Amino acid sequence: MSADAVIYEKQAGVATITKNNAPQYGMTLDVLTGMKNALVDANNDEDIQVIVITAGGPGFHMGGGSTRRSQYRLGIHTCRI
């Protein structure tokens, strides 16, 4: 897994999850795993009140390739509201 496919930062109650997989910015397995880990961490941190999801480049694409769809089954988690 690429360690920098997702950048996760927390500051002043805000968690920022940045997709950092140029040049495609799509939903690769590395991005999905990184986002899942960041979302679980933010959900479990009582200080986080806002989650921002963004991309580190000029494009923001949330789609995934259909050829890898079976690899994307990472589980479903209940989040606090």
Image (spheres, rainbow, N blue to C red):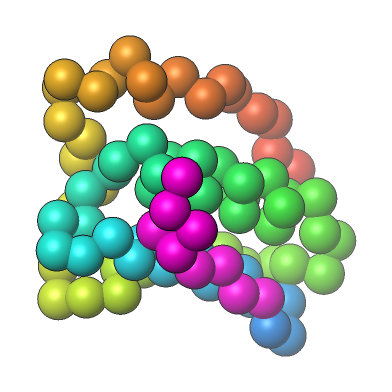
Q: Is residue 35 visible?
A: no
Foreground: 20 or 3?
Answer: 3
Q: Kindly identify the residue that appears in the image at 14 percent across and 76 percent down.
A: 58
Report which quarter residue 28 is drawn in: top left
Foreground: 13 or 57?
Answer: 57
Q: Kindly identify the residue that appears in the image at 62 percent across and 46 percent down.
A: 37
Q: Position of residue 18 (x, y in %)?
A: 42, 67
Report which quarter residue 36 is drawn in: top right
Residue 79 lies, with reference to residue 76, above or below; the image says: below
Q: Position of residue 66 (x, y in %)?
A: 16, 22
Foreground: 8 or 2?
Answer: 2
Q: Is residue 22 visible?
A: yes
Q: Kindly identify the residue that appears in the image at 43 percent across and 53 percent down.
A: 2
Foreground: 33 or 11?
Answer: 33
Q: Kindly identify the residue that appears in the image at 21 percent across and 65 percent down.
A: 22
Q: Based on the picture, tell me whether residue 20 belongs to the magenta stretch.
A: no
Q: What are the residue bounds of the magenta stretch?
A: 1-10
User: Position of 33 compared to 49: left or right?
Assistant: left
Residue 10 lies, with reference to residue 63, above or below; the image says: below
